[in-house]
Image (cartoon, helix red, strand yellow):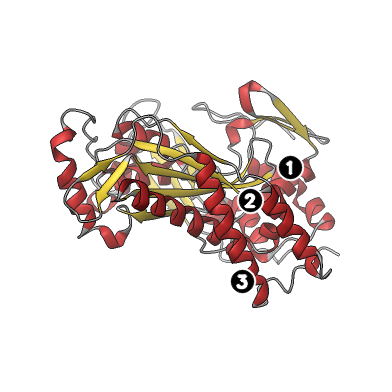
Amino acid sequence: MKDCSAVAGRPRFDLADIVREYRAQLESTIRLCTTQTRVLSAIELCRTAALGGHIDRCHACGCTTPAYNSCRNRHCPKCQALAAQKWIWSRTARLLPAQHFHVVMTLPAELRPLARAFPRKVYDALFAYTHETLSELGSTRLNANLGITMILHTWTRELKFHPHVHAIVTAGGLSRDGAGWNPSNKKYLFPVDVIGALVRGKMLEWLRTTRRIGGFDAFDEFLDPQAFERLMSRLASHNWIAYAKKPFRDSSHVMKYLGRYTHRVAIANGRIVDVTETSVTFRTKSGKLVSVPPVEFLRRFCLHILPPGFNKIRHYGLYSSAASATTYVHAKRALEPVKAGDVSPLPNAPPSSAELPWQEYLRSLTGRDVNHCRDCGALIEHLPIARPLCRAPPRPLAS
């Protein structure tokens, strides 16, 4: 595959090119679900003439540049930067002026096959019982209602399947009677072994209940009558991994940190170092490199395509939408005395996209001025490109 280096510091290699080149081989090897095929198709078409676009024409210097529309798919590495920045600024106004902890809850390796077969069920359960555990500990140990934002990730840096949730949790919460703010210990939120044990108990109970009502009947590994009990025994015999980082220094750091997690996809184009006919090489942690065959690379990428409509960012407690006009307002008032001292003020959010033309909104977010020529600085004209009236025939099904 040729080097796709471009101006403006764009990555040399593009996931879309790998999909176009090796998708047919992947589909001849494994059977993809409808959601996976749609995501791959969207990535293939992203920023191509098939989606239409416009031509930027400068009448001063004669520079003419085509600009094609994005697919806007949440799994596409080229479509997340603007969405992430818009999300961060939209949530800034909701962030409480308090310290926040970062908690990570990992799904045990024994449950990964079940998560691949029933992703929506397993991910929903991981969200629900991690949230319940943190909320219950906040109630029993702090007598407080916490603010929690949770984000699902399913990958490691090597693109292996590794479901886990990141939780940003307030270092304390509004007292149960609403009278004031009850802070947590400044060094830790709750013991991680307690968090893991409580989530384990809740998940095991959910697994037994779901199994009893037939929720896993289509799972081939449970055709053996004893397979489910062996799995439960293994899950109950070891600790479930929970991890908590020290609190952030101030609220502005929380938003910057969240920006690294909210709209992250399995792999960014910038991590792809080299693509050949036999391997795709990409960066992992600490500058290390991993090389895998192109078909294996795409197979790993497809493991992290979420079910349609699945919400991978969720808010609970003081950060839930239901708390906006009630407990959230009381919590913010309770924190006002410490806002000027212990916690840095929150940054001001820019105007919303509804208040500005898209060109001005893009400039406010990224600093890129699409109304002026990059070469001479003169105003440019945006001429629309019509989308093709016909579509290509559907791909033949892999045998």
Looking at the picture, how far across and down is residue 260, in whole percent? 46, 36
Quadrant (top left, top right, bottom left, bottom right) of the N terminus: top right
Q: Residues within 10 Å of mark 3 (few under 14, many from 20)?
A: few
Please tell me which residue lies in front, 317 or 23: 317
Assign a secondary structure to mark 2. Answer: loop
Which is closer to the viewer, label 2 or label 3?
3
Assign a secondary structure to mark 1. Answer: helix
Looking at the picture, how far across and down is residue 251, in whole percent? 29, 35
Residue 120 appears anywhere in the view: yes
Q: Residue, x 73% and y 53% (percent of image)?
A: 234
Please tell me which residue lies in front, 52 or 163: 163
Callout 3–callout 1 Cβ contact below 8 Å: no
Label 2 sits on residue: 304
Q: Residue, x 66% and y 58% (percent of image)?
A: 115
- Give the residue furthest to the right: 399
Please tell me which residue lies in front, 360 or 94: 94
Residue 297: mark in rendering: 1
Q: CA distance from mark 3 to mark 1?
A: 36 Å
Looking at the picture, how far across and down is residue 208, in whole percent? 65, 68
Please tell me which of labels 3 and 1 falls first in the chain: 3
Please tell me which of labels 2 and 3 falls first in the chain: 3
Please tell me which of labels 2 and 1 falls first in the chain: 1
Label 3 sits on residue: 209
Image quadrant of residue 394? Answer: bottom right
Which is closer to the viewer, label 3 or label 1?
3
Residue type (three-letter) at the residue carrying disc 3: Thr
- Give the residue furthest to the bottom: 213
Looking at the picture, how far across and down is residue 80, in whole percent? 48, 44
Residue 58: mark in rendering: none
Residue type (three-letter) at the residue carrying disc 2: His
Q: Residue, x 24% and y 45% (percent of image)?
A: 93
